[in-house]
Image (cartoon, coloured by chain):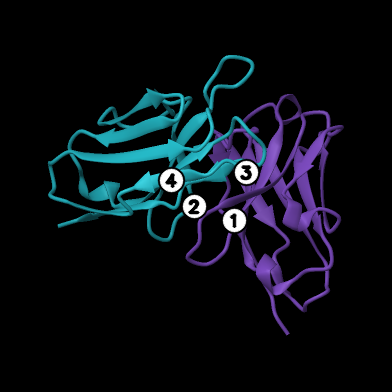
Chain colours: A purple, B cyan
Amino acid sequence: EVHLLESGGGLVQPGGSLRLSCAASGFTFSNLPMSWVRQAPGKVPECVSTISKGGDNTDYIDSVKGRFTISRDNSKNTLYLQMNSLRAEDTAVYYCAKGGHLDNWGQGTLVTVSS
Amino acid sequence: DVVMTQSPLSLPVTLGQPASISCRSNQSLIHSYGGTYLNWIQQRPGQSPRRLIYQISNRDSGVPDRFSGSGSGTDFTLKISRVEAEDVAVYYCMQATHWPLTFGQGTKVEIK
C-alpha cells in the first residue's frame, strides 16, 4: 500500500523559510517522478512543483520560482521542498503526491505564513 | 496555463439517483505521446484529495464502478450512476498533459 507522510509544516513569519519532507513507502520511489501540491483554505489545489525520478529535471509554477526548491533522496525514499522568502499567500496545506499525474496524495502538512 | 472549467459548481442529488459533472479545457489535452491526461479528483470533507479516475476513464484501485469517466479532446464528463452518502465531496477535474498541472474550480456534490 502506498504511504506518503509529510512533515515540516508550521507557523513562520513572512520572509522566513521552511523545509518540508515527505517519507514514501509502498512503491519503488526511485522509479517515479514526485510532486508537491498545495491547497489554500477553501481553494482549489495547485501543483507547485514536480521532480523527475532521478532528480535532474524539475518544474515550478511561476509564483514560487526562485523561492522554492524541490529535491529528493532516493536512498532514503524521501522528497523535500525547501521554501524560502515565504509570503502570506503561500499559506496552505502542502501535499506530497506520487507521480507526475498525482496518483496518490499524502495527508498534508499545514504551512502558515503570518506575523 | 490551461484553464479547466467545470459545471455545475453545486450539485444537489437524491440518494440513489445519478449525477453528472462536466469539465472543459481551453486547449486539447491530447499529449504528444498520444495519451490524454485528464484526471478526476475527489475530496471528501476534511480529507486529502484522492484520484478517482485517470486518463479520462480508468478507475483507480478501490474506486467503485458507479463512477465512470468519458470524453475526449477538450470535453469530459464524470458520472456517478447511483449516488451514495459517501459520495458527498468536492470533485475536481485536473489536466496533467501540460505544465503547470491545472484543476477545475470544483463541483460540490451534496445530498438533497
Tell me how far mark 3 sits from mark 1, CA to CA: 25 Å
Instruction: Give the chain letter at badge 2.
Output: B
Q: Residues within 10 Å of mark 1 (few under 14, many from 20)?
A: many
Report helix, strand or loop for mark 1. Answer: loop
Q: Is residue A77 above or below residue A30?
A: below
Which residue position is annotated with label 3? B1
Which residue position is annotated with label 1? A108
Q: Is residue B76 above or below residue B45?
A: above
Which residue position is annotated with label 2? B48
How far across and how far down the image is residue B20, in percent?
A: 25, 39
Instruction: Give the chain letter at badge 4.
Output: B
* Viewer-nearest residue: A65 or A92: A65
Quarter of the image with the N terminus of chain A in it? top right
Labelled pair 3, 1 in contact (Cβ < 8 Å): no
Task: Tell me the amino acid under the disc marked 3.
Answer: Asp
Quarter of the image with the C terminus of chain A in it? bottom right
x 70%, y 28%: residue: A32
Tell me how far mark 3 sits from mark 4, CA to CA: 13 Å
How far across and how far down the image is residue B60, in percent?
A: 44, 29
Discs 3, 1: same chain: no
Q: Which mark is residue B65?
A: none
x 57%, y 35%: residue: A2
Q: Is residue B82 above or below residue B6?
A: above
Tell me how far mark 4 sits from mark 1, CA to CA: 26 Å
Instruction: Give the chain letter at badge 1.
Output: A
Furthest-top residue in view? B34
Question: Toward which corner of the image does residue A20 lie, by quadrant?
Answer: bottom right
* Viewer-nearest residue: B2 or A114: B2
